[in-house]
Image (tube, grey):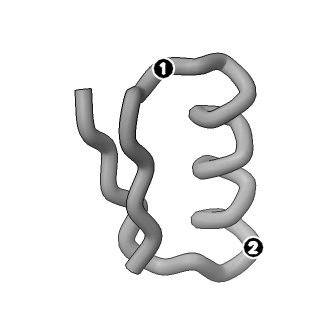
Amino acid sequence: MKVTVVGAGAVGATCADNIARAALAEELGLL
């Protein structure tokens, strides 16, 4: 599964970090 987080501020970075740590996606993109 691919996940894109739009907005890499504090909330976006936290979401991306949690997604990566939980291994919920094979690809993670930040915009």
Verify CB contact (< 8 Å) between mark 1 and mark 2. no
Q: Residue at x 32, y 44 (%)?
A: 3
* CA distance for labels 1 and 2: 20 Å
Q: Pointer 2: what residue?
A: 10
Question: SS of the residue at dot 1?
Answer: loop
Task: Spot the residue most to the front.
Answer: 26
| Labels 1, 2: front one | 1
Task: Spot the residue most to the left.
Answer: 1
Question: SS of the residue at dot 2?
Answer: helix
Residue 13 position, x and y percent, is 68, 64
Residue 2 position, x and y percent, is 26, 39
Quadrant location, the N terminus = top left
Q: Which mark is residue 13?
A: none
Query: Relative to 8, is 9 on the left or the right?
Result: right
Q: Pointer 1: what residue?
A: 24
Which residue is nearer to you in this view: 30 or 11?
A: 30
Residue 29 position, x and y percent, is 40, 61
Query: Relative to 27, is 8 on the left or the right?
Result: right
User: What amino acid type should be assigned to the residue bearing mark 1?
Assistant: Leu
Is 16 located above or below residue 29 in the figure? above
Quadrant location, the C terminus = bottom left
User: What amino acid type should be assigned to the residue bearing mark 2?
Assistant: Ala
Q: Residue at x 57, y 77 (%)?
A: 8
Is 19 located above or below residue 9 in the figure? above
Residue 4 position, x and y percent, is 32, 56
Say whether disc 1 or disc 2 marks the residue closer to the N-terminus.
2
Q: Residue at x 38, y 41 (%)?
A: 27
Q: Residues within 10 Å of mark 2 (few under 14, many from 20)?
A: few
Number of residue marks: 2
Please tell me in which quadrant of the rendered image residue 10 appears.
bottom right
